[in-house]
Amino acid sequence: MANRSNQLVIPGARAALEQMKFEIAQELGIQIPMDGYYGNMTTRDTGSIGGNITRRLIQIAEQQLSGSR
């Protein structure tokens, strides 16, 4: 397993991010490996998922800052 230094500030955020990852991958038609090994995925696919997660998180933050939902 990789040594990850990212520490989540909000308990339970990991589960929400994992759920978001699966939802975005499904929307993009990308199959996420169920065994957790991403070595067979293309960089393009993993980058697309990560980029869309970032876009969605920014959108959520903007909505919260503006007071709308």
Image (cartoon, grey):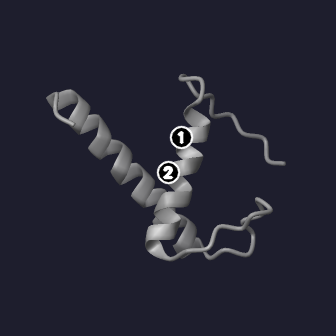
Q: Closer to the camera, 1 or 62?
A: 62
Q: Residue at x 62, y 76 (%)?
A: 42
Q: Is residue 67 left or right of residue 9?
A: left
Q: Residues within 10 Å of mark 1 (few under 14, many from 20)?
A: few
Contact? badges 2 and 1 (CB < 8 Å): yes
Percent coordinates x, y for residue 49 in the rendering: 49, 63
Question: From mark 2 to mark 1, how far is it between C-alphas?
Answer: 6 Å
Q: Quadrant of residue 40?
A: bottom right
In the picture, the disc for residue 20 is 2
Q: Give above or below for 19 relative to 28.
A: above
Percent coordinates x, y for residue 37 in the rendering: 78, 63
Percent coordinates x, y for residue 17 in the rendering: 54, 44
- SS class of the residue under badge 1? helix
Q: Give above or below for 30 relative to 5.
A: below
Which residue position holds label 1?
16
Q: Residue at x 59, y 23 (%)?
A: 11
Q: Residues within 10 Å of mark 2 (few under 14, many from 20)?
A: some
Q: Looking at the picture, which amino acid does disc 1 mark?
A: Ala
Q: Give above or below for 61 relative to 42.
A: above
- SS class of the residue under badge 2? helix
Q: Give above or below for 22 relative to 30.
A: above
